[in-house]
Amino acid sequence: MLPDCAFVETQFELCITSAGSSDGGGAAPLSPTQQLVKAAGFGDLEQKFLFNQFMKACAPSASMCFPVFAQYFAARGFSYERAKHLFRAFDSHRRGFLQFRDFLVGHAAMEPSTPHGSTPAELRCRYIFRYYDEDCDGCLSFREFRNIIRDIRLAKKLSATDDEVTFDATEQAKVFSQEKKELLPLNDFLSAVGQLKFRGTSNLFRLASSALTPLKTNGGGSDHPPPKRTKPSQARSPGSTSEESDSSVFSLPGRPAPRLDTTGGRRSPTSPSSAFGVGGSGGGDSGGGAGSGAGGGDPSSGSTPSSPNTAFELATHTVKVRRSGSLSEVSLLWDVDSSAFSESAQKDILSHGLRRVDRLLSLDTTFNLRSHPNEMINGLRYFERACRGSTAAGSSSGQQPQLEDKPAMNWGQVEMKGLARCLLSLCEMLQTVFSEEPRMVKLRSPTYILGDIHGNYHDLVCFEKVLWRLGTHLSPANFLFLGDYVDRGQFGVEVVSYLFAQKAMSPKKFILLRGNHEIRDIQENFTFKRECMAKFGDSYGLQVWEAVNRCFDRMPIAATVDGKIFCVHGGIPRPSLYRSLERDLNAVPCPLPSPVDQSPLAWEIMWSDPLHPPQAGASAAGAAAAATADDDASDFGSSDVGFAFNKRRGTACCFSYQALDSFLRANKFSHVIRAHEVQQVGFQIQQKGKLLTVFSSSHYCNGNNEAACVLADHYKIRLIRLDTSSTHHSGTPAFYSSASGRTSPSATATTSSPGSGGVRSGRIVDAIDSASSSTSPGEGAASASVTADDDECNLPTIDL
C-alpha cells in the first residue's frame, strides 16, 4: 500500500539577509556565493522576487530541470542552444537540475551591475569557464578558448572575422604559458585573469538588462512579466537565431550601421555568450550618442526639490568626452582601471553603494547601447547626416553593388518597417512612464523651456547641440517642452521618435507637455496622420499613429518651475473650471483621448490665448473695444471676469491682463510661460511682462520667424534665440512636395541683450531678464510680418 502523499509548501530561505549576515544570522563571515549575491545587490526583496519567478516556472517541483530552464530563458530571448550553455554554467554541482540557490547565484553572476573584481570576479570567471567548457572536462580546448576571444571582440565592437579571431586567440594564449598546450585548465585561467594578464572577461556572461527590471517596473513584489523593453514580444523557439527574430532597422547593404533590436535590448550573434555583452563606447560627433538621454542614477533627479537630508551618491557610469563636446566612451564605474579606487572603496562602495534597484534605468536603458532609446537615437544620427555612396564588398554573388548617396535628413535605404517597430516599442514603454507622471509636473530650476516644434527636426537638433550636447543627464538643467510636436512640418515622426527616446532615458528631466496638436481630430485635419501613412504604409502607419497618440493621451497638461512659473501650451483656464488648480489638474483623467469631452479644464489650457491689443492703424472704436475687454468684459459668468470667447479659434477663451493678474495672485505664481502662437523673433513678452510666449520652430510654414527657448535659472528668465539663418528651409511636408534637399543645421545660439549692437552667435550671452527688468516691451512687440498661429478647431463649438 502506497503511503499518503501531499504537496509540501516550499519554504523560502534567504541566501543573505538585508543586514548582510549569513543565513543563520550572527557575525559569521559571508561565503563566496553570499558575497556574490551581496555584490549583485540582491537583498530580501530581490531574492523573494527571483524565488517567485523560480517557483512559478517549475512548480509543483522544488527544482528546475533543463527543459523548464530553457523555457524560462526562451521567454527572455535566449535560444535553445544558448540555454544549454547557460544551464551548464548554473549547474555548478553537475546534478542535472537546479535548486533555487543555484538559480539565484547564477543570476547574481550575470547581473549587469555585478562588479568584476575581488571574490565576485573569481566566481564570475568560474561561471564563464563552465559556460565555454562544452565537454565539461575541466579544461578549455583551443576551439572553446577561441569562442571566448570572439565574444570579447564582439562585446568591444571589434571586427570578428575568422582570421582575426584565430590570430587574436593565438596571441592571447601566450599569456597563459609560453609553451604550446592543447588544453587550458581552470586554475591557469583564473590565475591569468586575477593577475590582469588576460583582459576582457568583465564583458562576458552578462544579461543585456537586469533580471530585476520587472521588480522595479511593477513597484515591488509583483511577479508579472516585464514590459516589452526587457522582454521579447514573443518567445523564440528552440534553435531560433537572431536573424529570425531580430530585425535590422538601420543596416544598409554592405555598410555597417546602427541596428534597432526588437527584443528589448538583447542582441544575438551566433556565439554562445555574445548576448551577454554590455555595450561599448558610443556617441558620435553630433553629440548625444550613448549617453544622449542619460537618465541613469537617481530616477527622481531634477523633478522634485531635494530634501535637506538627501545625500549625494556616486553614479554608476563614467564617460569620456571629446574636445568637440561629444561622448567617446561610456563605462561602468567598476570597469575602470583598478587604480581609480582605493582598496576600501572597492570593498565598500563598489560592492554595496551602487547595487540598488533604482539604478536599473541607468544600466538597462540610458547607457545600454542596445536599448530601444539608444538605438533610436543612433538611427536618427544616421538620418540627420549626409552619407557619400560607396562600394559594398562581400556580396554573395561576388559583385560589388554601388550604394547611392544619401542626403541629410533622409532615411536612404533604411527599412522603414523596422523603424516603425522600434517606435512602437518606445511608445509601449512610455505609456507607463507618462501614466505615472502627475498632470501638473513640478520642476526646479535651472530649466530650459521650449515651445512649438511642429515637425521641425532641424531646429530640434540645433537646440540639442547647443543646450544638451553631452546628454540631458550630464546637464545640470531640466528640459520642458510645451507641446505641438507634430503637424505642419516635414519630420513629425522623427521629432516624436527623438523626444520619446530622450524621455525614455531621462524620464524625470525631459518633460513633455500636451499641446492642441496632440489630439487625433486635429492631426487628421492637418498632416501628422498622413505623414505616418506616407512613411510607413497604411498598416504600419496607422499602428504608429495610434501608438503615438496613446502616449499623447497620457501626457501631462501643465508644469511649474520652483513653484513660481506656470507653464502650459495655450494659456490659463477660467476660474469657474477649478477650485484648487493643482488638485483639479492632477484629477484630469488619464488617459485623455478626447479632452473636449472629458476635461474642459485641460481643453481650455491647451487652446486659450491672451487678448491681443489692436495693431497700429486700427480704428478708435476697435481700440476702445479692446480696452474694454481687457478691463472687465466677460463672455462667461461673473466669476470669469477678464475672459472672452476665443473667436479666432472657435473654442476655449482669451484672457486679459486682469484675468492673468488674478490667476497669478490666487496661485502665488510670478509668471506664465506658454507657446501656441508663432512669434517673429521666437518669443514675445506680453501683459505687463507677466506672460511670455515662446516658439521653437523657425521658418514656420515658409515664414521668416526665428526659434527661441527660455532658461529659468536663479530667479531670472532668460530668452535665448536660435540662429538658423544659414539653414533656411521650406516647411512644406515631404509627402506634399518632392523638394527635400536640405543641409544639416548649424547649432548657433543667439540671445537678446539690452543694448547689444547686433546678433551674437556661437555662445550664450546675458539675455533679456524679464523677471527683474524695470520696463517691459510693448504689447505689440511682435512684427506684423508674422501671422499668429491660425489653427482653428474644426470641432463643434462647445460652451465651456
Image: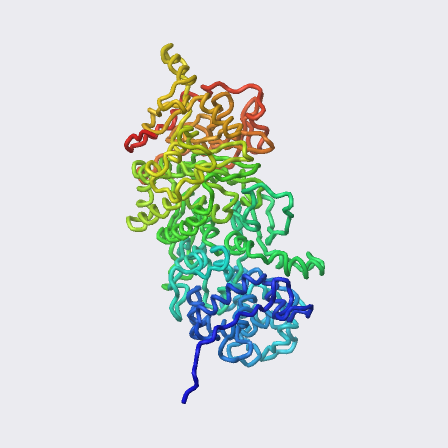
Would residue 478 appear left or right of 179 to someone viewing this image?
left
In the image, residue 124 above or below residue 528: below
Location of residue 282 with respect to 549 vertically, above or below: below
Identify the image quadrant of residue 259: bottom left
Left or right: 437 in relation to 543: right
Q: Viewer-proximal residue, 686 or 172? A: 686
| Residue 453 x %, y % | 43, 36
User: Relative to residue 349, is residue 466 drawn left or right?
Assistant: left
Quarter occupied by residue 243: bottom left
Q: Quadrant of the N terminus?
A: bottom left
Q: Relative to residue 741, is residue 50 drawn left or right?
A: right
Quarter holding the C terminus is top left
User: Does the rendering let one see residue 573?
Assistant: yes
- In this orientation, does residue 742 appear? no
Q: Is residue 54 above or below residue 737?
A: below
Residue lying farthest top?
620
Q: Please count the marks in the image.
A: 0
- Where is residue 660? Give x, y as percent: 46, 25
Q: Position of residue 87 (x, y in %)?
A: 49, 73
Question: Residue, x 56% and y 26% (percent of image)?
Answer: 771
- Residue in the image at 60% along x and 50% along y: 320
